[in-house]
Image (cartoon, rainbow, N blue to C red):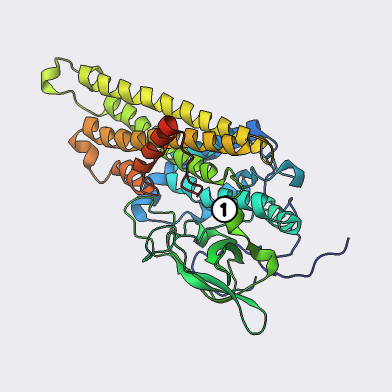
Amino acid sequence: MTAEPNRFPGLFTSPNPTTVSINAPTPPAQPSPSEPGVAVIRDDAHALTVARQLAAELAPGAAERDRQRRLPWAEVERFSQSGLWGITVPRSHGGAEVSHTTLAEVTALISEADPALGQIPQNHFCLVDAVRLIGNAEQQRFFFAQVLAGQRLGNAVSETGTANSKVVTTRVSRGPDGQLRLNGRKAYSTGALFAHWVPVAALDDDDRAVLAYVPRHAPGLQVADDWTGFGQRTTASGSVTAEQVLIEPLQLFERHRLFEPPTIHGPYAQLLHAAIDLGIARAALADLRHWVRERARPWADSGVTQASQDPLSLHRIGELVIRLHAAELMLERGGLRLDRARALEGQPGSAEAVTEASIAVAEAKVLSTTLSLDASSTLIELGGTQATLEEHNLDRHWRNARTHTVHDPIRWKYHVVGDHWLNGATPRRHASL
Protein backbone atom coordinates (compact mmCIF):
# COMPACT_ATOMS: atom_id res chain seq x y z
CA MET A 1 0.00 0.00 0.00
CA THR A 2 1.34 3.46 -0.91
CA ALA A 3 1.71 5.75 2.08
CA GLU A 4 0.06 9.18 2.16
CA PRO A 5 2.29 12.24 1.74
CA ASN A 6 4.10 13.07 4.96
CA ARG A 7 2.01 16.12 5.83
CA PHE A 8 2.77 16.24 9.53
CA PRO A 9 6.39 15.10 10.06
CA GLY A 10 7.72 14.81 13.59
CA LEU A 11 4.50 14.70 15.59
CA PHE A 12 5.53 11.48 17.30
CA THR A 13 8.05 13.51 19.27
CA SER A 14 6.58 13.93 22.74
CA PRO A 15 5.76 17.53 23.71
CA ASN A 16 8.83 19.15 25.24
CA PRO A 17 8.26 19.76 28.98
CA THR A 18 10.80 22.57 29.05
CA THR A 19 9.27 24.80 26.38
CA VAL A 20 6.20 26.95 26.14
CA SER A 21 6.41 28.11 22.53
CA ILE A 22 5.53 25.56 19.89
CA ASN A 23 7.92 26.00 16.99
CA ALA A 24 9.36 22.54 16.40
CA PRO A 25 8.93 20.35 13.31
CA THR A 26 5.86 18.31 13.08
CA PRO A 27 4.10 12.46 12.21
CA PRO A 28 3.69 10.01 9.64
CA ALA A 29 0.20 10.41 8.24
CA GLN A 30 -0.45 6.74 8.94
CA PRO A 31 0.86 6.00 12.47
CA SER A 32 0.78 2.39 13.55
CA PRO A 33 -1.68 1.44 16.33
CA SER A 34 1.08 -0.80 17.65
CA GLU A 35 3.52 2.07 18.25
CA PRO A 36 6.13 0.69 20.71
CA GLY A 37 5.06 1.03 24.32
CA VAL A 38 1.39 1.78 23.67
CA ALA A 39 -0.85 -0.89 25.13
CA VAL A 40 -4.00 -2.08 23.41
CA ILE A 41 -7.11 -2.19 25.60
CA ARG A 42 -9.29 -5.14 24.58
CA ASP A 43 -12.64 -4.43 26.22
CA ASP A 44 -14.47 -2.84 29.16
CA ALA A 45 -13.20 -5.30 31.77
CA HIS A 46 -9.62 -4.83 30.61
CA ALA A 47 -10.00 -1.03 30.73
CA LEU A 48 -11.22 -1.13 34.33
CA THR A 49 -8.43 -3.48 35.39
CA VAL A 50 -5.76 -1.26 33.84
CA ALA A 51 -7.35 1.86 35.37
CA ARG A 52 -7.32 0.36 38.87
CA GLN A 53 -3.68 -0.67 38.52
CA LEU A 54 -2.67 2.71 37.12
CA ALA A 55 -4.57 4.61 39.81
CA ALA A 56 -2.68 2.72 42.51
CA GLU A 57 0.57 3.68 40.78
CA LEU A 58 -0.30 7.37 40.36
CA ALA A 59 -1.88 8.12 43.74
CA PRO A 60 1.20 8.19 46.02
CA GLY A 61 2.73 11.28 44.38
CA ALA A 62 -0.46 13.30 43.88
CA ALA A 63 -0.26 15.41 47.05
CA GLU A 64 3.37 16.30 46.45
CA ARG A 65 2.76 17.20 42.82
CA ASP A 66 0.00 19.53 43.99
CA ARG A 67 2.17 21.05 46.72
CA GLN A 68 5.04 21.77 44.33
CA ARG A 69 2.78 22.55 41.34
CA ARG A 70 4.90 20.03 39.45
CA LEU A 71 3.45 19.23 36.05
CA PRO A 72 2.92 15.47 35.62
CA TRP A 73 4.82 14.96 32.37
CA ALA A 74 5.96 11.42 33.16
CA GLU A 75 2.58 10.50 34.63
CA VAL A 76 0.66 11.73 31.58
CA GLU A 77 2.98 9.77 29.32
CA ARG A 78 2.49 6.65 31.45
CA PHE A 79 -1.27 7.23 31.37
CA SER A 80 -1.50 7.47 27.59
CA GLN A 81 0.95 4.60 27.06
CA SER A 82 -1.42 2.42 29.15
CA GLY A 83 -3.86 2.49 26.24
CA LEU A 84 -6.61 4.13 28.26
CA TRP A 85 -6.65 7.26 26.11
CA GLY A 86 -7.73 5.12 23.16
CA ILE A 87 -10.62 3.23 24.76
CA THR A 88 -13.36 5.26 23.05
CA VAL A 89 -12.12 4.72 19.50
CA PRO A 90 -14.84 2.79 17.61
CA ARG A 91 -14.35 -0.93 17.07
CA SER A 92 -14.65 -0.31 13.34
CA HIS A 93 -11.32 1.53 13.60
CA GLY A 94 -9.56 -0.89 15.94
CA GLY A 95 -10.57 0.54 19.32
CA ALA A 96 -12.31 -1.00 22.31
CA GLU A 97 -15.31 1.38 22.10
CA VAL A 98 -16.04 0.93 25.79
CA SER A 99 -19.43 1.80 27.26
CA HIS A 100 -20.06 5.21 28.77
CA THR A 101 -20.40 3.66 32.21
CA THR A 102 -16.93 2.16 31.85
CA LEU A 103 -15.48 5.44 30.61
CA ALA A 104 -17.01 7.26 33.59
CA GLU A 105 -15.63 4.74 36.08
CA VAL A 106 -12.16 4.84 34.49
CA THR A 107 -12.25 8.64 34.83
CA ALA A 108 -13.43 8.43 38.45
CA LEU A 109 -10.71 5.90 39.34
CA ILE A 110 -7.92 8.06 37.92
CA SER A 111 -9.44 11.20 39.45
CA GLU A 112 -9.55 9.58 42.87
CA ALA A 113 -5.80 8.99 42.54
CA ASP A 114 -5.10 12.46 41.11
CA PRO A 115 -7.95 14.65 39.79
CA ALA A 116 -5.55 16.67 37.65
CA LEU A 117 -4.68 13.49 35.76
CA GLY A 118 -8.39 12.70 35.59
CA GLN A 119 -9.16 16.09 34.04
CA ILE A 120 -6.30 16.34 31.54
CA PRO A 121 -7.80 13.74 29.11
CA GLN A 122 -11.39 14.94 29.55
CA ASN A 123 -11.18 17.15 26.48
CA HIS A 124 -9.23 14.44 24.65
CA PHE A 125 -12.15 12.04 24.98
CA CYS A 126 -14.64 14.72 23.94
CA LEU A 127 -12.61 15.60 20.87
CA VAL A 128 -12.23 11.95 19.90
CA ASP A 129 -16.02 11.84 20.08
CA ALA A 130 -16.16 14.90 17.82
CA VAL A 131 -14.12 13.00 15.23
CA ARG A 132 -16.69 10.20 15.43
CA LEU A 133 -19.65 12.54 15.11
CA ILE A 134 -18.56 15.05 12.46
CA GLY A 135 -15.36 13.72 10.91
CA ASN A 136 -15.39 12.45 7.33
CA ALA A 137 -14.00 9.01 6.48
CA GLU A 138 -10.47 10.30 5.88
CA GLN A 139 -10.43 12.33 9.10
CA GLN A 140 -11.72 9.40 11.14
CA ARG A 141 -9.18 7.02 9.64
CA PHE A 142 -6.32 9.41 10.34
CA PHE A 143 -7.20 10.71 13.81
CA PHE A 144 -8.41 7.41 15.25
CA ALA A 145 -5.10 5.86 14.18
CA GLN A 146 -3.27 8.75 15.85
CA VAL A 147 -5.11 8.16 19.13
CA LEU A 148 -4.50 4.41 19.11
CA ALA A 149 -0.82 5.13 18.52
CA GLY A 150 -0.69 7.10 21.78
CA GLN A 151 -1.25 10.61 20.46
CA ARG A 152 -3.03 13.02 22.82
CA LEU A 153 -5.60 15.67 21.91
CA GLY A 154 -5.57 18.88 23.94
CA ASN A 155 -8.09 21.68 24.05
CA ALA A 156 -8.26 25.32 23.05
CA VAL A 157 -11.95 26.21 23.14
CA SER A 158 -12.69 28.83 25.81
CA GLU A 159 -11.87 32.52 25.60
CA THR A 160 -11.81 35.31 28.18
CA GLY A 161 -13.09 38.87 27.86
CA THR A 162 -16.15 37.85 25.85
CA ALA A 163 -19.83 38.40 26.68
CA ASN A 164 -20.13 34.82 27.97
CA SER A 165 -18.23 31.54 27.91
CA LYS A 166 -19.84 30.38 24.65
CA VAL A 167 -18.65 33.33 22.55
CA VAL A 168 -15.75 32.63 20.17
CA THR A 169 -13.70 35.31 18.39
CA THR A 170 -10.86 33.13 17.04
CA ARG A 171 -10.92 32.88 13.24
CA VAL A 172 -10.00 30.47 10.47
CA SER A 173 -9.83 32.62 7.35
CA ARG A 174 -8.81 32.02 3.76
CA GLY A 175 -6.15 34.41 2.55
CA PRO A 176 -5.50 35.80 -0.93
CA ASP A 177 -3.24 32.80 -1.61
CA GLY A 178 -6.14 30.41 -0.95
CA GLN A 179 -4.57 29.06 2.25
CA LEU A 180 -6.52 28.73 5.51
CA ARG A 181 -4.93 30.42 8.51
CA LEU A 182 -5.88 30.36 12.19
CA ASN A 183 -5.64 33.40 14.48
CA GLY A 184 -6.81 33.91 18.05
CA ARG A 185 -6.14 33.46 21.74
CA LYS A 186 -7.60 30.86 24.08
CA ALA A 187 -7.68 30.34 27.86
CA TYR A 188 -8.33 27.41 30.22
CA SER A 189 -6.71 25.11 27.65
CA THR A 190 -6.52 21.96 29.77
CA GLY A 191 -4.33 19.32 28.20
CA ALA A 192 -2.86 21.51 25.46
CA LEU A 193 0.63 21.64 26.96
CA PHE A 194 0.78 17.82 27.10
CA ALA A 195 -0.88 17.27 23.72
CA HIS A 196 0.30 16.18 20.29
CA TRP A 197 -2.74 17.85 18.69
CA VAL A 198 -4.49 20.99 19.92
CA PRO A 199 -8.07 21.29 18.61
CA VAL A 200 -8.95 24.99 18.48
CA ALA A 201 -12.53 26.31 18.37
CA ALA A 202 -12.98 29.10 15.82
CA LEU A 203 -15.33 30.72 13.33
CA ASP A 204 -14.85 30.46 9.58
CA ASP A 205 -15.42 33.16 6.97
CA ASP A 206 -19.16 32.38 7.02
CA ASP A 207 -19.29 32.74 10.84
CA ARG A 208 -19.84 29.01 11.24
CA ALA A 209 -18.31 27.24 14.25
CA VAL A 210 -15.38 25.00 13.32
CA LEU A 211 -12.63 23.03 15.07
CA ALA A 212 -9.08 23.11 13.77
CA TYR A 213 -6.96 20.16 14.97
CA VAL A 214 -3.52 21.79 15.03
CA PRO A 215 -0.25 19.85 15.52
CA ARG A 216 1.24 20.87 18.84
CA HIS A 217 4.48 21.85 17.08
CA ALA A 218 2.87 23.88 14.28
CA PRO A 219 4.69 27.15 13.53
CA GLY A 220 2.71 30.05 14.97
CA LEU A 221 1.08 28.06 17.78
CA GLN A 222 2.14 28.92 21.31
CA VAL A 223 1.05 27.14 24.50
CA ALA A 224 1.74 28.94 27.78
CA ASP A 225 1.79 27.34 31.22
CA ASP A 226 0.18 30.36 32.89
CA TRP A 227 -2.55 28.59 34.86
CA THR A 228 -2.60 29.95 38.44
CA GLY A 229 -5.80 28.41 39.82
CA PHE A 230 -5.68 27.46 43.51
CA GLY A 231 -7.00 23.98 42.65
CA GLN A 232 -6.34 21.46 39.89
CA ARG A 233 -2.93 23.09 40.01
CA THR A 234 -1.13 20.61 37.74
CA THR A 235 -3.54 20.51 34.80
CA ALA A 236 -1.54 23.23 32.99
CA SER A 237 -4.86 24.81 31.98
CA GLY A 238 -3.12 27.82 30.50
CA SER A 239 -3.46 29.80 27.31
CA VAL A 240 -2.99 29.06 23.61
CA THR A 241 -2.18 31.68 20.99
CA ALA A 242 -2.43 31.09 17.24
CA GLU A 243 -0.81 33.51 14.82
CA GLN A 244 -1.14 32.78 11.12
CA VAL A 245 -1.19 29.01 11.70
CA LEU A 246 -1.68 27.15 8.41
CA ILE A 247 -4.66 24.76 8.42
CA GLU A 248 -5.19 21.93 5.94
CA PRO A 249 -8.67 20.55 5.06
CA LEU A 250 -7.90 17.31 6.94
CA GLN A 251 -7.55 19.32 10.14
CA LEU A 252 -10.82 21.25 9.88
CA PHE A 253 -14.09 19.98 11.38
CA GLU A 254 -17.55 21.55 11.16
CA ARG A 255 -18.20 22.17 14.84
CA HIS A 256 -21.62 23.66 14.09
CA ARG A 257 -22.77 20.11 13.24
CA LEU A 258 -21.88 18.72 16.68
CA PHE A 259 -25.34 19.30 18.12
CA GLU A 260 -27.58 19.28 15.06
CA PRO A 261 -29.28 16.91 14.75
CA PRO A 262 -29.26 16.31 18.53
CA THR A 263 -26.23 14.25 19.55
CA ILE A 264 -24.82 12.93 22.82
CA HIS A 265 -21.82 15.27 22.71
CA GLY A 266 -23.09 17.56 25.49
CA PRO A 267 -24.04 14.94 28.09
CA TYR A 268 -20.93 12.96 27.07
CA ALA A 269 -18.73 15.87 28.17
CA GLN A 270 -20.75 16.38 31.34
CA LEU A 271 -20.54 12.71 32.29
CA LEU A 272 -16.76 13.00 32.40
CA HIS A 273 -16.93 16.15 34.55
CA ALA A 274 -19.27 14.38 36.96
CA ALA A 275 -16.86 11.42 37.12
CA ILE A 276 -13.95 13.73 37.99
CA ASP A 277 -15.96 15.21 40.87
CA LEU A 278 -16.91 11.73 42.04
CA GLY A 279 -13.23 10.79 42.12
CA ILE A 280 -12.42 13.87 44.21
CA ALA A 281 -15.21 12.95 46.64
CA ARG A 282 -13.94 9.38 46.97
CA ALA A 283 -10.41 10.62 47.71
CA ALA A 284 -11.67 13.07 50.35
CA LEU A 285 -13.77 10.37 52.00
CA ALA A 286 -10.83 7.97 52.03
CA ASP A 287 -8.76 10.56 53.91
CA LEU A 288 -11.75 11.31 56.15
CA ARG A 289 -11.97 7.65 57.16
CA HIS A 290 -8.26 7.55 58.00
CA TRP A 291 -8.28 10.79 59.97
CA VAL A 292 -11.37 10.05 62.04
CA ARG A 293 -10.12 6.54 62.81
CA GLU A 294 -6.46 7.34 63.44
CA ARG A 295 -5.84 11.04 64.06
CA ALA A 296 -8.89 13.03 65.18
CA ARG A 297 -10.01 13.49 68.79
CA PRO A 298 -13.63 13.25 69.94
CA TRP A 299 -15.45 16.36 71.07
CA ALA A 300 -15.35 16.77 74.83
CA ASP A 301 -19.14 16.60 75.25
CA SER A 302 -19.53 13.40 73.21
CA GLY A 303 -18.87 11.05 76.13
CA VAL A 304 -16.69 8.76 73.98
CA THR A 305 -12.95 8.20 73.90
CA GLN A 306 -12.52 7.81 70.15
CA ALA A 307 -13.53 10.19 67.37
CA SER A 308 -14.77 7.22 65.38
CA GLN A 309 -17.48 6.71 68.03
CA ASP A 310 -18.67 10.32 68.20
CA PRO A 311 -22.43 10.01 67.44
CA LEU A 312 -22.74 13.33 65.62
CA SER A 313 -19.69 12.57 63.48
CA LEU A 314 -21.15 9.16 62.63
CA HIS A 315 -24.39 10.85 61.57
CA ARG A 316 -22.51 13.22 59.28
CA ILE A 317 -20.35 10.47 57.81
CA GLY A 318 -23.37 8.25 57.24
CA GLU A 319 -25.04 11.03 55.28
CA LEU A 320 -21.97 11.44 53.06
CA VAL A 321 -21.66 7.70 52.42
CA ILE A 322 -25.30 7.50 51.36
CA ARG A 323 -24.80 10.43 49.00
CA LEU A 324 -21.65 8.78 47.62
CA HIS A 325 -23.57 5.64 46.76
CA ALA A 326 -26.36 7.71 45.23
CA ALA A 327 -23.89 9.67 43.11
CA GLU A 328 -22.24 6.45 41.91
CA LEU A 329 -25.59 5.01 40.89
CA MET A 330 -26.68 8.22 39.20
CA LEU A 331 -23.42 8.35 37.25
CA GLU A 332 -23.97 4.77 36.12
CA ARG A 333 -27.56 5.63 35.17
CA GLY A 334 -26.34 8.58 33.13
CA GLY A 335 -23.85 6.34 31.34
CA LEU A 336 -26.55 3.82 30.50
CA ARG A 337 -28.76 6.57 29.09
CA LEU A 338 -25.85 7.71 26.93
CA ASP A 339 -25.31 4.15 25.70
CA ARG A 340 -28.96 3.98 24.71
CA ALA A 341 -28.88 7.37 22.98
CA ARG A 342 -25.79 6.44 21.01
CA ALA A 343 -27.36 3.17 19.91
CA LEU A 344 -30.34 5.16 18.55
CA GLU A 345 -28.30 7.73 16.61
CA GLY A 346 -29.95 8.36 13.24
CA GLN A 347 -33.05 6.37 14.18
CA PRO A 348 -36.56 7.35 15.33
CA GLY A 349 -36.54 8.39 18.97
CA SER A 350 -32.95 9.59 18.85
CA ALA A 351 -33.70 13.18 19.91
CA GLU A 352 -35.80 12.03 22.86
CA ALA A 353 -33.04 9.63 23.95
CA VAL A 354 -30.49 12.45 23.84
CA THR A 355 -32.77 14.61 26.01
CA GLU A 356 -33.17 11.83 28.57
CA ALA A 357 -29.41 11.32 28.63
CA SER A 358 -28.84 15.05 29.14
CA ILE A 359 -31.27 15.14 32.06
CA ALA A 360 -29.85 12.01 33.69
CA VAL A 361 -26.28 13.26 33.44
CA ALA A 362 -27.29 16.71 34.76
CA GLU A 363 -28.80 15.00 37.81
CA ALA A 364 -25.59 13.01 38.33
CA LYS A 365 -23.51 16.18 37.99
CA VAL A 366 -25.53 17.93 40.69
CA LEU A 367 -24.92 15.07 43.12
CA SER A 368 -21.22 14.67 42.37
CA THR A 369 -20.61 18.43 42.59
CA THR A 370 -22.27 18.92 45.97
CA LEU A 371 -20.76 15.70 47.34
CA SER A 372 -17.20 16.61 46.35
CA LEU A 373 -17.51 20.00 48.04
CA ASP A 374 -19.17 18.69 51.20
CA ALA A 375 -16.90 15.65 51.60
CA SER A 376 -13.73 17.70 51.22
CA SER A 377 -14.99 20.34 53.67
CA THR A 378 -16.16 17.75 56.22
CA LEU A 379 -12.74 16.12 56.11
CA ILE A 380 -11.25 19.31 57.59
CA GLU A 381 -14.15 19.79 60.01
CA LEU A 382 -13.99 16.31 61.55
CA GLY A 383 -10.21 16.04 61.22
CA GLY A 384 -9.82 19.02 63.53
CA THR A 385 -7.25 21.77 63.65
CA GLN A 386 -4.35 19.48 62.83
CA ALA A 387 -6.07 18.67 59.52
CA THR A 388 -5.46 22.27 58.42
CA LEU A 389 -1.68 22.03 58.67
CA GLU A 390 0.10 22.58 55.37
CA GLU A 391 2.26 19.50 55.86
CA HIS A 392 -0.79 17.26 55.32
CA ASN A 393 -2.13 19.16 52.28
CA LEU A 394 -5.66 17.93 52.97
CA ASP A 395 -7.08 21.18 51.68
CA ARG A 396 -6.17 20.07 48.14
CA HIS A 397 -9.39 18.03 47.95
CA TRP A 398 -11.57 21.10 48.54
CA ARG A 399 -9.39 23.29 46.32
CA ASN A 400 -9.64 20.72 43.53
CA ALA A 401 -13.40 20.30 43.97
CA ARG A 402 -14.12 24.02 44.13
CA THR A 403 -11.95 24.78 41.12
CA HIS A 404 -13.26 21.99 38.90
CA THR A 405 -16.92 22.47 39.80
CA VAL A 406 -17.01 26.08 38.59
CA HIS A 407 -16.58 24.73 35.06
CA ASP A 408 -20.34 25.01 34.59
CA PRO A 409 -22.89 26.03 37.25
CA ILE A 410 -25.17 23.38 38.73
CA ARG A 411 -27.74 26.08 39.50
CA TRP A 412 -28.67 25.86 35.81
CA LYS A 413 -28.82 22.08 35.99
CA TYR A 414 -31.47 22.32 38.71
CA HIS A 415 -33.34 24.67 36.38
CA VAL A 416 -33.06 22.34 33.39
CA VAL A 417 -34.16 19.28 35.36
CA GLY A 418 -37.11 21.11 36.89
CA ASP A 419 -38.20 22.65 33.59
CA HIS A 420 -38.04 19.28 31.86
CA TRP A 421 -39.93 17.45 34.60
CA LEU A 422 -42.62 20.10 35.01
CA ASN A 423 -42.99 21.51 31.50
CA GLY A 424 -41.46 18.88 29.25
CA ALA A 425 -38.86 21.42 28.09
CA THR A 426 -35.94 20.24 25.96
CA PRO A 427 -32.47 21.28 27.18
CA ARG A 428 -30.37 23.52 24.98
CA ARG A 429 -27.73 21.72 22.94
CA HIS A 430 -24.16 22.57 23.95
CA ALA A 431 -21.23 21.01 25.80
CA SER A 432 -22.51 22.02 29.25
CA LEU A 433 -25.72 19.96 29.07
Q: Is residue 310 left or right of residue 159?
A: left
Give the amino acid at mark 1. Glu
Rendering coords of residue 127 (x, y %): 58, 53
Above or below, 255 relative to 406? below
**Can residue 53 be seen in this snapshot?**
no
Instruction: Identify the residue at the far left of this view.
Output: 301
Rendering coords of residue 210 (x, y %): 58, 62
- Kindly indicate the quadrant of the structure image that contains residue 319: top left
Rendering coords of residue 175 (x, y %): 61, 81
| Residue at screen point 38% across, 53% down | 233
Instruction: Identify the residue at the far bottom of this view.
Output: 176
Q: Is residue 68 left or right of residue 208?
A: left
Report the front residue among 300 and 193: 193
Q: Secondary structure at mark 1?
A: helix
- Label 1: which residue? 77
**Can residue 114 be seen in this snapshot?**
yes
- Kindly indicate the quadrant of the structure image that contains residue 221: bottom right
Report the front residue among 31 and 204: 204
Instruction: Assess disc 1: are there few (<14), some (14-19) or many (≥20) residues with their C-alpha within 10 Å of its C-alpha.
Output: some
| Residue at screen point 46% across, 43% down | 273
Q: Is residue 405 left or right of residue 46?
A: left
* Quarter of the N terminus within the rendering: bottom right
Callout count: 1
| Residue at screen point 56% across, 59% down | 195
Rendering coords of residue 304 (x, y %): 17, 15
